[in-house]
Image (cartoon, helix red, strand yellow):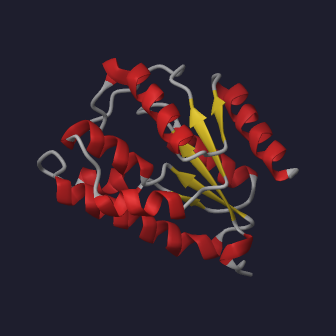
Amino acid sequence: MENPKSEIRKIAIVGPESTGKSTMSAHLAEHYNTVWVPEFAREYCEKLTEPPTWQDEVNMFYGQLALENELSPKANKLLICDTTFITVKIWSDHTFGKSPQEVLDELPIHPYDLYLLLDIDLPWEEDPLRDFPHMREHFMDVWHRELQALNARYVVISGNGPERYDRAVAAIDEFLKF
């Protein structure tokens, strides 16, 4: 049975590169018996032969929104989102010095109910789509600033293995009490 979109609570799993967002998203979706929205940009960038352009960033923004809209009706009360299009803003600001207007316009009207900001305390894992192992602290600070600018409800999740997952579940459970 599909739920009306208004009843769905959106949980965003965000953070710098190599913090376990996809693994955490899959774990949480299984734990809460729901679906999760994968990171659209990963599949998109795997097909690129050159670094992403401004238009690619705009395409990734629309792709992430479309994927979220497609999967939302299949959610069981919670929709777990492996990142959000805020990532497009962060990468665009870093790469181009500004963000697509579409992203800036949509940020305040497309909120998530809770953000879990995954800490950089996991070891860096090499991946052809990851670029900044030396800038993890910088991007962690950027994530804090972006979430604060949105007045977002967020919790930093740290720890390794089961401890990290347990902290994420506890943060969501605490949020769901209200």
Give the x, y percent position of residue 108.
51, 58
Q: Which is more toward the observer, 176 or 89?
A: 89
Quadrant in which residue 78 is drawn: bottom right
* In this rendering, position of residue 144 left or right of residue 63: right
Q: Which is more toward the observer, 109 or 18?
A: 109
Question: Compared to 134, does 15 lie above or below?
Answer: below
Question: Compared to 77, does 47 lie above or below?
Answer: above
Tag count: 0
Residue at the image position 44 percent from the left and 66 percent from the top: 65
Quadrant in which residue 77 is drawn: bottom right
* The N terminus, quarter of image: bottom right
Give the x, y percent position of residue 100.
28, 56
Question: Compared to 161, does 56 lie above or below?
Answer: below
Residue at the image position 32 percent from the left and 18 percent from the top: 134
Give the x, y percent position of residue 59.
27, 63
Residue at the image position 70 percent from the left and 67 percent from the top: 8
Q: Residue placed farthest to the left in the image?
A: 50
Residue at the image position 58 percent from the left and 50 percent from the top: 12
Q: Residue placed farthest to the right in the image?
A: 177
Give the x, y percent position of residue 124.
41, 22
Q: Which is more toward the observer, 60 or 90?
A: 90
* In this rendering, position of residue 84 left or right of residue 5: left
